[in-house]
Image (tube, helix red, strand yellow):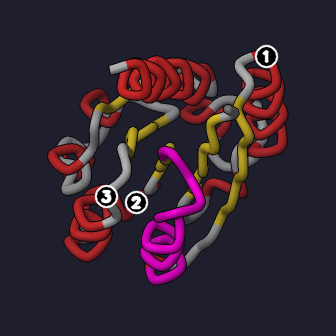
Amino acid sequence: MSLRILVLHGPNLDALGTREPQVYGRETLGDVERALSELGRESDCEIESRQTQHEGVLIEALYGARGHSDGVLLNPGGLTHTSVALRDAVLACGLPVVEVHVTNPHTREAFRHRSLVSGAALGVVQGFGIDSYRLALRGLIAHLRRDRAS
């Protein structure tokens, strides 16, 4: 049976490739989604991706994933550092959630060093450019398959 993974991209991630390419790289959100779709096909996983600028939409998507998805990759963007509500939704959705970041927030401004989401997530992958998404997906798939086998 195929796994179903929801990928949520938060604020400003639609600007990947053009927004501060010296920080975030030149790959676009489309590149991320193509890479995840390809890895999903290779791994017998259905990948659904969504991007929004709005905190409430991310929260609704997390709650809506229950019963439809087996796990979630979440790049909360700037909401990482500010949203208690998003953290609460990660805890409450009842699914394994992996937090993803293209950059390593700990090498950036001090206000980015603290994630409100990380403590609620199964794991965190950051700092590897768009490969962070691939690594996170591989980790989530392995976790879900181990859970199914036990």
Checking the image for residue 96, the label placed there is: none
Query: Of the residues tagged 2 and 3, which is closer to the observer?
Result: 3
Observer-nearest residue: 121 or 67?
Answer: 67
**Residue found at x 41% / y 19%:** 149
Q: Position of residue 32 (x, y in %)?
A: 73, 35
Mark 2–mark 1 distance (CA, rounded to whole Å): 31 Å
- Quarter of the view holding residue 43: top right
- Contact between labelled residues 3 and 2, with CB atoms less than 8 Å apart: no
Checking the image for residue 94, the label placed there is: 3
**Residue found at x 70% / y 53%:** 49
As for residue 144 lying within the magenta part, the answer is no
Give the residue number, with chain letter if any, for mark 1. 42
59 horizontally vs 15: left or right: left
**Residue found at x 63% / y 27%:** 130
Mark 2–mark 3 distance (CA, rounded to whole Å): 23 Å
Range of magenta residues: 56-71
Q: In this view, does 22 lie above or below 111?
A: above
Check disc 2 and give the amino acid type: Gly
Give the residue number, with chain letter if any, for mark 2. 78
Check disc 3 and give the amino acid type: Gly
